[in-house]
Amino acid sequence: MKSEENRMNRIASILGIKYPFIQGAMSWLTDAKFVAAVSNAGSLGILGPNAGAHTVTTSADETAERMRDQIKQTQALTDKPFAVTLIVAGGETSIFTKKILDVVIEEHVPAVLLNSLGGVSSATYGVDPATMKTLKAHGIKTIVRSLQPSIEDAQAVEAQGADIYVATGFDEGGTMPGGEIGSFAIMPMIADAIAIPVALAGGIADARTVNAAFALGAEGVYVGSRLIPTTENPAAENVKQLIVDSTAEDLTLFRTLPDYYRSLPTKLVDQLAENDRTLPAVEAKKANAKLMGGTSGMRIGMLDGDLEHGYVSVGTGISMVHSIQSVQAVVDELMADYRG
């Protein structure tokens, strides 16, 4: 890429970062140490919904205070921009999100990732207007990543005034979109439909995939799985090594709510895959969602390292992961052809 083009990169400029590299939220697999390392490496670190936590809480107040603690710890470890995840829908926002939003404002967090649960119909495209209005009123930068990305959803998000849209392809890890469109097919489709900058998520794991994303219209990348096998990530060591030792050929795809997940082999995944093979689609989704326990199965499998009772959800880009590295080394490797 030409240096002149890099100096004009809109995502880096909007977020005040060196590289147009956004770290994935990854549910349980972030904490202040990891997020600060990502931001210090010149990218945007993001505290995920369960950042720093090892136990489940049903209290919105406790959830918010846990996030406040992680924000303060991150601020003590970096003076670079970072973000906090807010889970939003097209309609009314939950009390959990509202409480965390209050903390984000009180602690002067410069950006948020809006993980949108909408995007499945015209009634749910975009995010909660009240939440977006509040964020804009406080000058907080907004990155929207929809569970079901589409042209219509991206246009709705743009109309609401979001700063950045994340186009998520079927190559991602975690909760996968129901639209089975690969990352390098969805990228130009979304980029051609909206004027705000777009970051690509799903399968971004080396400099080649970063360059391909930019060639297809991306102005940034959104990276999750590639950052799990790093020294600073809170994932269990056996999980990090499993990712290093595996390729996309080892992944199992199965139905669950809302649509699909994929995982490396575990005892639980054997049962999930069996349900997918033997039950009708609707029944398989419900049965597997119950077995997975929401994201608790990820906490058990990836944070605790229990490969019997949990799962290890990663994207297809793991084929390009060959060692456990520092966050800085990963960022440097992926952005090797980017000169700001």
Image (spheres, rainbow, N blue to C red):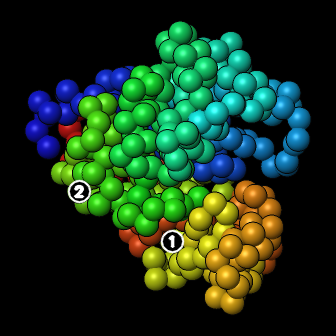
Residue at the spot of label 1 = 244
Q: Report, in whole angstroms, how far the alpha carbon at label 2 lies from the one at label 1.
A: 23 Å
Asked if residue 25 lies left or right of residue 205, the reply is right
Write down the residue under mark 2. 212
Q: Is residue 255 left or right of residue 325?
A: right
Question: Does residue 82 sit above or below 331 in this rendering?
Answer: above
Image position, residue 136 (x, y; %): 50, 15
Question: On screen, 78 above or below 223?
Answer: above
**Mark 2 Cα within 10 Å, few/some/many (few <14, many 20+)?**
some
In the rendered image of this protein, does residue 31 appear above or below residue 211? above
Residue 3 visible, this orientation:
yes
Q: Amino acid at mark 1?
A: Val
Residue 75 screen position, x and y as percent: 61, 23
- The x, y position of residue 160, in whole percent, is 45, 25
- Neighbours of disc 1 within 10 Å: few (<14), some (14-19), many (20+): some
Image quadrant for the N terminus? top left
* Disc nearer the start of the sequence (2/1): 2
Residue in view at x 77 percent, y 74 percent: 287
User: Which quadrant holds residue 289?
Assistant: bottom right
Q: Residue at x 51, y 62 (%)?
A: 178
The picture places residue 234, in percent across and down from the top left corner, at: 66, 51
Q: Residue at x 36, y 60 (%)?
A: 183
Q: Quadrant of residue 158?
A: top left
Outermost residue toward the top in this view: 137
Q: Amino acid at mark 2?
A: Ala
Q: Secondary structure at mark 1?
A: helix
76, above or below 262, in the image: above
Pick the quarter of the image with the C terminus.
top left
Picture residue at 55% right of the left edge, 10% below the top: 138
